[in-house]
């Protein structure tokens, strides 16, 4: 009988505590019933115990007891002695439970934020003006050249496939157009990889923490997720290590390894040169299939990721010597200190898997993170054989990506250096402002200065951030706890705090977060 963890259920229960009339138990019961009716939680799922759910939601046990009682009287819950409380669903055949990852795009979150709260649940960036300019520059001739066929290009239009291949060649990574598959953003690329290369029950190695969209895709496929590494104060700035992979492979043979070596989501860290070389050796020795997700790599900030923020006293400064390096160049050769992010503005990030056999690796990339989330253009780089396998599955889902979006993407590829420089300047300034805000307002919180990306990965000492997030939501503040990024529901003392839109939302939310942290004792 399937059971749902309290942490996962809490991430699905969005909006219930801060919206709607009636007492809290009624609102909780209504939210649980809605999950069952929509099929977000499959019929027959055993819910957490009343005590466990109360702890993670930051409410009294009597609130959960009353909510369960309302569900049972309405025929939505069945209590079985010795087996717990089983939710009755709407007859959906889908037994997979999602993570509620898209809550930040839901109208309920927007309503809560507009009512005086703050939405810190998404790190997505506002679009660059270059997107509108590229759209305006399209001509009838651009589209007319493609109107002679049916408009279906399962692999992507030739000009974009060649443009992406050239993107890698410019970085010194030999790539041909037949090694590229255009996808609807990097999320579809990860989903396709899971569908094509993973069978239910396969072992997949992931970093801990890691991108929660990948966790969803792999869990939905029935993968057995095994974490490597960790995220402690003595991990040298890396979120996983190759030695842990070697130890794991002595016991089990993974189907594949999923990594984010550059501008890791959610930590913002980038592997330094030594770590990258060690990973390359370990992966090559074991002949493992590797999926490298570079979705956020173009958001590298170009300075050293060594300094730590908060209570350890370095105040989040960038270099290992405690000094900021605002020009982004830490090496005499002009390349970033992370030794994997390419030159400061000139070339694409160099994938770690570039040194591994093409047939045993996939690189996932996207323009959506750098330019705009509304531009759904991503890709896979792999062997022609793997590309063909992924394209076959993709065709069954959406036939092909929008030709117009792809034409826009072709033009935007020429503007990558400009976009990198602009995003880097914006994000550096906003990161520094966010760090200053936390140093002043929450001096006991801890974080490592990110080398890239739009968010801080913050440790809140002594707090259970699952309960903190639920308490904050009742005050109109939406925030994502660290366990959402963990394959084993770890990091319950962490929060991801985005700064990509500036610090106004964080400044507005901080008093509430501090108050809730005092109440949400871990």
Image (cartoon, helix red, strand yellow):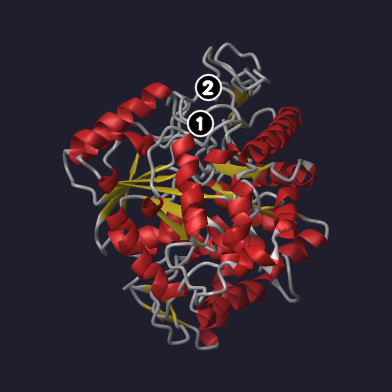
Q: Residue at x 80, y 44 (%)?
A: 504
Q: Which residue is mark 2?
A: 335
Relative side of 385 to 212, left or right? left
The picture places residue 296, in percent across and down from the top left corner, at 54, 43
Question: Quick one: 135 or 377, which is closer to the camera?
Answer: 135
Which numbered circle lies on residue 359?
A: none
Examine the image and state in which quarter residue 395 appears. Answer: bottom left
Q: SS at mark 1?
A: loop
The picture places residue 469, in percent across and down from the top left corner, at 62, 52
Tags 1 and 2 touching, CB below 8 Å? yes
Q: Which label's residue is closer to the chain start, 1 or 2? A: 2
Crowd tier of the residue under label 2, counting other residues whose Cα lies within 10 Å: few below 14, some 14–19, many 20 or above: many
Q: Is residue 238 above or below residue 255?
A: above
The answer to whether residue 342 of the structure is visible from this angle is yes
Q: Which residue is mark 1?
A: 341
Relative side of 417 to 224, left or right? right
The picture places residue 499, in percent across and down from the top left corner, at 69, 41
The picture places residue 41, in percent across and down from the top left corner, at 47, 74
Question: Quick one: 48 or 498, which is closer to the camera?
Answer: 498
Relative side of 37 to 140, left or right? left
Q: Is residue 8 above or below residue 487?
A: below
Q: Is residue 505 above or below residue 446?
A: below
Crowd tier of the residue under label 1, counting other residues whose Cα lies within 10 Å: few below 14, some 14–19, many 20 or above: many
Distance of label 1 from label 2 (alpha carbons): 8 Å
Q: SS at mark 2?
A: loop
Q: Residue at x 46, y 29 (%)?
A: 340
């Amino acid at each position: 009988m399937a059971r749902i963890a309290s942490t996962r259920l809490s991430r699905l229960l969005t909006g219930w505590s801060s919206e709607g009339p009636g007492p809290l138990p009624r609102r909780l019961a209504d939210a649980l019933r809605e999950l069952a009716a929509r099929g977000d939680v499959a019929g027959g799922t055993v819910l957490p115990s009343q005590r466990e759910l109360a702890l993670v939601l930051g409410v009294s046990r009597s609130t959960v007891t009353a909510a369960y009682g309302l569900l049972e009287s309405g025929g939505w819950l069945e209590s079985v002695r010795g087996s717990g409380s089983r939710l009755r669903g709407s007859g959906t055949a889908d037994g997979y439970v999602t993570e509620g990852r898209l809550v930040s795009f839901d109208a309920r979150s927007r309503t809560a934020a507009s009512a005086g709260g703050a939405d810190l649940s998404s790190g997505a960036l506002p679009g660059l003006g270059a997107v509108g300019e590229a759209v305006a520059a399209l001509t009838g001739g651009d589209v007319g050249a493609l109107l002679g066929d049916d408009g279906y290009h399962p692999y992507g239009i030739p000009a974009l496939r060649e443009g992406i291949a050239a993107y890698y060649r410019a970085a010194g990574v030999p790539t041909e157009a037949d090694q590229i598959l255009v996808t609807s953003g990097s999320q579809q690329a990860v989903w396709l990889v899971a569908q094509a290369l993973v069978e239910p029950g396969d072992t997949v190695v992931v970093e801990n923490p890691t991108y929660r969209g990948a966790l969803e895709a792999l869990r939905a496929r029935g993968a057995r997720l095994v974490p490597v590494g960790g995220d402690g104060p003595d991990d040298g700035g890396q979120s996983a290590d190759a030695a842990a992979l070697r130890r794991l492979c002595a016991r089990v043979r993974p189907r594949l390894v999923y990594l984010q070596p550059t501008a890791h989501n959610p930590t913002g860290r980038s592997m330094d040169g030594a770590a990258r070389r060690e990973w390359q050796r370990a992966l090559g020795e074991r002949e493992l299939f590797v999926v490298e997700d570079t979705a956020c790599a173009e958001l590298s900030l170009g300075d050293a990721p060594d300094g730590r923020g908060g209570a350890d006293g370095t105040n989040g400064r960038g270099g290992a010597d405690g000094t900021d390096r605002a020009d982004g160049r830490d090496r005499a050769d002009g390349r970033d200190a992370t030794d994997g992010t390419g030159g400061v503005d000139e070339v694409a990030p160099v994938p770690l898997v570039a040194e591994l056999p093409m047939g045993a690796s996939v690189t996932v990339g996207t323009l959506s993170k750098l330019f705009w989330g509304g531009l759904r253009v991503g890709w896979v780089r792999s062997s022609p054989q793997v590309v063909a396998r992924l394209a076959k599955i993709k065709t069954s889902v959406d036939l092909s990506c929008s030709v117009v979006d792809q034409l826009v993407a072709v033009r935007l590829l020429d503007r990558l250096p400009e976009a990198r420089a602009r995003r880097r300047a914006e994000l550096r300034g906003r990161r520094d402002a966010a760090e200053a805000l936390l140093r002043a307002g929450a001096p006991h919180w801890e974080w490592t200065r990110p080398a890239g990306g739009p968010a801080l990965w913050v440790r809140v000492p002594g707090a259970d951030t699952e309960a903190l997030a639920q308490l904050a939501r009742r005050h109109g503040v939406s925030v994502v706890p660290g366990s959402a990024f963990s394959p084993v529901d770890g990091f319950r003392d962490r929060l991801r705090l985005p700064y990509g839109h500036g610090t106004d939302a964080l400044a507005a939310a901080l008093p509430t977060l501090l108050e809730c942290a005092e109440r949400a004792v871990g």
